[in-house]
Image (cartoon, rainbow, N blue to C red):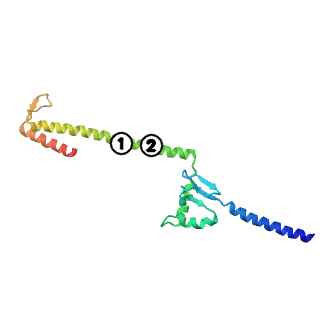
Amino acid sequence: MFKFWSKHTVTASSFTIAALLIASSCQAQYVWLDEKGNKQFSDLPPPANISKAKIIKAPSRSALTTSSTTTPAGASPSTSASAINEQLKKPVTTTSKNEDYNKRKAEQEEKDKKSAAEQLANSEKSKNCERARSYQKTLESGQRIANTSANGEKNILSDTQRAQELKDTQRILNDCK
């Protein structure tokens, strides 16, 4: 009777060991970072849209194939591992999401202000160029042009003053092109 129990016990224990080995290989875990930077765990491979560089852990059979492909060309495996570790160090919290949002919002507002300032400057330059073109046509027409002095007296431009005004206007128009 003792032999029966010992044979049965050996068979049962070998069956248990075999079952544990099979189960451990079936429970192989994949660990990867999703597009938001969150760590994902699964016994199934990650979706196809996840790059191999973001796969942190794969089962032993596929680990050999992924370890050679996870590192970018010219980078060592420790480089990609350190980049992943840096991503893992900073947990994604509501506060960090708000900080990122506020930073992006401030950058966008700065871009908008800069764009508005450029548009205003371009508009002013366009107006000034149009005025200079108009003044140049008036100067070239030969009409009598008068200006008012600081005392309030009316002075008519002489030919030399007209020529000087034309030079000044032409210099302004050279910046308009």
Going 44% across and 43% down the picture, which residue do you hit? 106
Q: Position of residue 96 (x, y in %)?
A: 54, 47
| Foreground tag (2 vs 1) | 1
Residue located beneath label 1 in the image: 115
Can you say whether 91 is above or below 71 in the image? above
Picture mark count: 2
Q: Nearer the viewer, residue 131 or 25?
A: 25
Q: Position of residue 21 (x, y in %)?
A: 73, 65
Secondary structure beneath disc 2? helix
Sequence-wise, the earlier of marks 2 and 1 is 2
Can you say whether 17 is above or below 97 in the image? below
Q: Position of residue 10 (x, y in %)?
A: 83, 69
Q: Quadrant of the N terminus?
A: bottom right
Outermost residue, right side: 1
Q: Nearer the viewer, residue 94 or 157?
A: 94
Q: Quadrant of residue 27?
A: bottom right
**What amino acid is at disc 1?**
Ser
Can you say whether 85 is above or below 172 in the image? below
Going 74% across and 63% down the picture, which residue do you hit? 20
Q: Position of residue 114 (x, y in %)?
A: 36, 43
How far apart, in angstroms, are the residues tagged by discs 2 and 1?
14 Å
Disc number placed over residue 106 in the picture, else none: 2
Going 92% across and 70% down the picture, which residue do you hit? 2
Q: Nearer the viewer, residue 35 or 124?
A: 35
Residue 10 shown left or right of residue 104 in the figure: right
